[in-house]
Amino acid sequence: MAYTFLKAEGFTVGKSLVENEMIDTARQIKERCEHSKVALLLPTDHQVVDSYEPIKDGKVAAKTIPIEFTNAGHAGMDIGIETVSHFANALRDAKTIIWNGPMGVFEEPPFDEGTIGIAKAVAEAADRGAIVIVGGGDSVAAVSQAGVADRITHISTGGGATLEFLAGKELPGVAALTDRRSSH
């Protein structure tokens, strides 16, 4: 998701995953954040590779570079250590954290470092009393892989459903249960 926002801001994102059809939406979200004085945090550095192919062979030539140094041949795979620190600092005073989705291709070391760093940061926030909700199978796997799942307030494997529930949308499964109860 970050690369869509970065591309909308005019950064070169190379071969990183981008939802081109969402570029205008990313710009609108950024404008709404600015208007509402809400910080929109984006990566300042990231781990990149020159091709997705070496990952399949187990030979990964990754390097961490600032976002602005990304060239057309790079594919972003994970946030960098500077971004982990920046995001973790932003979470320090949080009272509620909702996390849906890893920071990168965390299934493939070394691209798990950013996600594990954020998992530890949200667990530390929970330790300080924040309510931490983690939604989605990949996010659940990430907090488990980081060894902090037992410190998270609530974990749901239904990432999309969790977000829809928090947005106030009707969930078909819950609606069916409600309808069933009212008919008896």
Image (cartoon, rainbow, N blue to C red):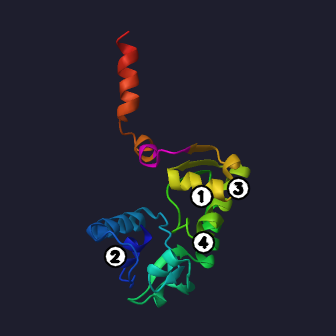
Q: Residue furthest right?
A: 127
Between 147 and 170, which is closer to the camera in this rendering?
147
What range of the chain is rendered magenta?
156-162
Question: Alpha-carbon distance for marks 4 and 2?
Answer: 28 Å
Q: Can residue 92 be seen in this view?
A: no
Question: Alpha-carbon distance for marks 3 and 2?
Answer: 35 Å
Q: How many marks?
A: 4
Question: Alpha-carbon distance for marks 1 and 3?
Answer: 9 Å
Question: Alpha-carbon distance for marks 4 and 3?
Answer: 16 Å
Q: Which residue carries the number 2 mark?
A: 8
| First in residue order: circle 1 vs circle 2 | 2
Q: Relative to 8, is 119 on the left or the right?
A: right
Vertical position of residue 158 compared to residue 63: above or below = above
What number is the disc on residue 142?
1
| First in residue order: circle 1 vs circle 3 | 1
Question: Alpha-carbon distance for marks 4 and 1?
Answer: 12 Å
Q: For mark 3, give the secondary structure.
A: loop
Vertical position of residue 90 compared to residue 100: above or below = below
Question: Alpha-carbon distance for marks 1 and 2?
Answer: 28 Å
Q: Which residue carries the number 3 mark?
A: 147
- The amino acid type of the residue labelled 1 equals Ala
Q: For mark 4, give the secondary structure.
A: loop
Q: Of the residues tagged 1 and 2, which is closer to the observer? A: 1
Q: Which residue carries the number 4 mark?
A: 109
- The amino acid type of the residue labelled 2 equals Ala
| First in residue order: circle 4 vs circle 3 | 4
How many residues crowd around disc 4 within 10 Å: few (fewer than 14), some, or many (20 or more)? few
Q: Which residue lies furthest to the top in this view?
A: 184
